């Protein structure tokens, strides 16, 4: 089984400059090595500089949240970020979010005081009802005993 050779990349002339075909995505690798190297070096320098800026901004935001939100207010940063996320939503998106939130909380029973004693009382009430029916109905009492 032999490997098939790839056909050479097609280069089309457009507006007096050489361009690679759309299926290859860019100029041929051997085309103007000096320019390609310069583009790579400029891009790397810009990316590194932007990443440093991003790291600095991230550190500044973190310090701001820790000092003001967590330290001064005693609020959880995750709670603040959730509020910030909602704040950033536009009108209809915000309304849709609140509708979804209400529907989800209602389905989950959030906002209703959950109490394990309520569940025990319900079970006790069911058991008492079954017991009353058994005592009051001689047919069931005879078959139970």
Image (cartoon, rainbow, N blue to C red):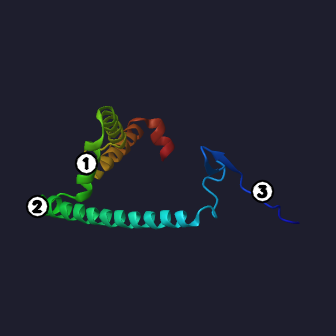
Spatial separation of the CA atoms under disc 2 and disc 3: 66 Å
Asked if disc 2 and disc 1 are in contact, CB closer than 8 Å, the reply is no
Q: Secondary structure at mark 2?
A: helix
Rendering coords of residue 90 (x, y %): 30, 36
Q: Is residue 46 left or right of residue 22?
A: left
**Residue linked to disc 1:** 84
| Frontmost residue, 116 versus 85 | 85
Q: Residue at x 36, y 43 (%)?
A: 108
Residue 111 visible in image: no
Vertically, is 83 above or below 136? below
Rendering coords of residue 31 (x, y %): 62, 61
| Frontmost residue, 142 versus 85 | 85
**Who comes first in sequence, dot 3 or dot 1?**
3
**Residue linked to disc 2:** 72
**Who comes first in sequence, dot 2 or dot 3?**
3
Q: Among all residues in the image, which is located at the extreme front?
A: 16
Give neighbour class at mark 1: few <14, some 14-19, many 20+ (Cα, 10 Å). few
Q: Residue at x 80, y 61 (%)?
A: 5
Give neighbour class at mark 2: few <14, some 14-19, many 20+ (Cα, 10 Å). few
Rendering coords of residue 81 (x, y %): 26, 53
Residue 14 visible in image: yes
**Residue linked to disc 3:** 7
Q: Secondary structure at mark 1?
A: helix
Rendering coords of residue 61 (x, y %): 23, 60
Q: Quadrant of residue 111?
A: top left
Spatial separation of the CA atoms under disc 2 and disc 1: 18 Å
Which mark's residue is nearer the viewer, 3 or 1? 3
Give neighbour class at mark 3: few <14, some 14-19, many 20+ (Cα, 10 Å). few
């Amino acid at each position: 089984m032999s490997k098939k050779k790839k056909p050479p990349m097609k280069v089309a002339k457009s507006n007096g400059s050489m361009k690679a075909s759309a299926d290859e995505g860019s100029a041929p690798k051997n085309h103007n090595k000096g320019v390609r190297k310069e583009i790579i070096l400029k891009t790397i320098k810009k990316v590194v500089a932007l990443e440093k800026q991003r790291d600095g901004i991230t550190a500044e935001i973190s310090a701001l949240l820790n000092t003001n939100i967590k330290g001064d207010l005693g609020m959880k940063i995750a709670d603040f970020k959730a509020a910030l996320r909602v704040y950033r939503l536009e009108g209809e998106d915000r309304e849709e979010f609140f509708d979804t939130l209400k529907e989800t909380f209602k389905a989950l029973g959030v906002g209703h005081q959950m109490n394990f004693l309520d569940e025990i009382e319900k079970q006790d009430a069911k058991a008492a009802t079954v017991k009353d029916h058994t005592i009051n109905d001689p047919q069931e009492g005879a078959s139970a005993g």
